[in-house]
Structure formats: C-alpha cells, structure tokens
Image: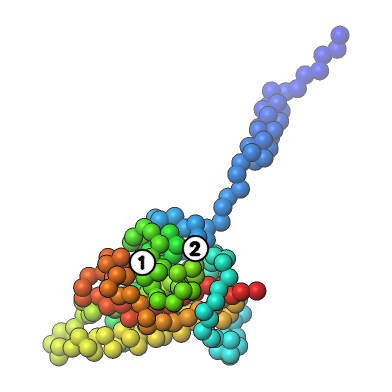
Amino acid sequence: MRRYTIPVAAMLVLAAGVGAQNQDAGAPAEVALTTSNLPFDTVKLVPPDLGRPAPLMQALKERRSVREYDARPLTLSQLSELLWAANGVNRDDGKRTAPAAVNQQLVDIYVVLSGGAFLYDVPGGRLVPVASGDFRKLAGRQDFVTTAPVNLVYVADPARFKSRPGGPATPDDEKLNWSRIAVGAMAQNVGLYCATEKLGNDVRAMVDREKLGPALKLRPDQAILLAQTVGCLKP
C-alpha cells in the first residue's frame, strides 16, 4: 500500500488558515463609532482631513441655520473635524483655528451627546467624559435640541486669564467680552464646516443655564455663553 505524507509544517499552515477563516466568519463586525454609541470614556479624536477641497465662497453661500434634522448620528470623523474647525490646533506653536485676544484661551467647548457630556481637550485632541446621561434637553428650549445628535456648549472661564506682569488689571466684563468674540468665531467656523459637509447647525443663546451648569459640573465663575446644535440634514 502506498502512503501519502504531508509535511508537518504544511499541515500547520493549512490548519492555521482554516482556523483563521472560521474565526473571521464567526467574528462580529467592528462597529463604527458615532455620536449615538460613543463610550462614556476618554475618546481620541480623528485628525482632520486637510486634503479635501472646500471652497470658502461656496461654504459661505451654503451657511444657514437649520432646525430640522435627520435621525442619523454623526460619525466620529465628522465630530472630530467639526471640533477641530471650532477651535482646534492648526499651527506648530499650538495656536488655534479661532482667534483669541492675546491668545488668552478662556473658552471651553462641551459636547452634549445622547449618552453623556464631554469636554473637548484641545491640546490632547480628545474628548474627556464629564457626566453620563442625556442632557440635551438642558442645552436649549426648542424641541429639536432634545433629539439632535450633537449640542456644543461654549463656556467662558475667566479665571484662566493671565495678567501681564506690571500691567493694569483687566475687568471681568472685558474678559467676558473677549470670550464672546472668540465664541462667535468658533460658532462660525462650525457653521462653515457644516456647510461643506452637508450638515445642519443652529446657534442659540436660549439655554437652561441654571440646570445645565451643574450638569456639566461647572464652577459658579464659569459662564455658559452660547450653544450650537449640529445634525444631519433631512433628505
């Protein structure tokens, strides 16, 4: 009787290949992170894609306020890019996409999603968890705010102001005015990004500050200046 032999190494390779195929077939597909399933944990944001064409004049033409949104969530990439557009680092010296008087970075951006509230850590390029739960209803008084996937809350922190040695004291009102100017630029940056991405946004001053402040664990000296809703346009 003739015997056929397969080298041991070849058998191991075949077995490994079959095992890998079975594992791939039975393995669950990786779920893409979106604003609806983002874990309540520190989340590393995606670097912006700076290679895409984005004509400024067309973005200005398309920029508008939208108060009706589709139910689809934003992708992690979209969320990352709109935050970078708002106030991300765009230079090697750490300066930002939005202007700030004397580079005094007095404004924080809080991101309110269906599963929790996060703080945008600009230098770290990440989201830091603040409070678990759905606080969207506190981010505005209109119905659409409670169901939109993203609400940005712009918060001034005048205590971070750094006085120049030997210079005159800066009144708190002036610090807040500088912060308001910076927030206006940030909100417009987000609006232009939304215009290029076919997203909707709406800037609002009507916010339940008395309840939202404690929910975001803000100190009494921090001030909520503005909120901005972002979502997918309806087909």
Cα–Cα span, label 1 and label 2: 14 Å
Quadrant of residue 42 within the rendered picture? bottom left
Residue under the point 46% across and 85% down: 188
Quadrant of residue 169 within the rendered picture? bottom left
Residue under the point 37% across and 81% down: 206
Q: Is residue 121 left or right of residue 34?
A: left
Residue 9 is marked as none
Looking at this view, name the residue that lies furthest to the right: 1
| Foreground of the two, 151 or 207 | 207
Residue under the point 31% across and 84% down: 179
**Residue 52, x across and y down, in percent:** 60, 76
**Residue 139, x across and y down, in percent:** 38, 73
Q: Which three-letter amino acid code belongs to the residue tagged 2?
A: Thr
Examine the rendering and report whether any part of residue 181 can be seen.
yes
Q: Secondary structure at mark 1?
A: strand
| Foreground of the two, 75 or 141 | 141
Looking at this view, name the residue that lies furthest to the top: 1
Residue under the point 37% across and 83% down: 205
Q: Secondary structure at mark 2?
A: loop
Comparing marks 1 and 2, which lies closer to the viewer?
A: 2
Quadrant of residue 86 within the rendered picture? bottom left
Residue that mark 1 sits on: 119
Q: Which three-letter amino acid code belongs to the residue tagged 1?
A: Leu
Residue that mark 2 sits on: 35
Examine the rendering and report whether any part of residue 92 can be seen.
no
Badge 2: residue crowd in 10 Å (few <14, some 14–19, many ≥20): many
Q: Is residue 202 left or right of residue 28?
A: left
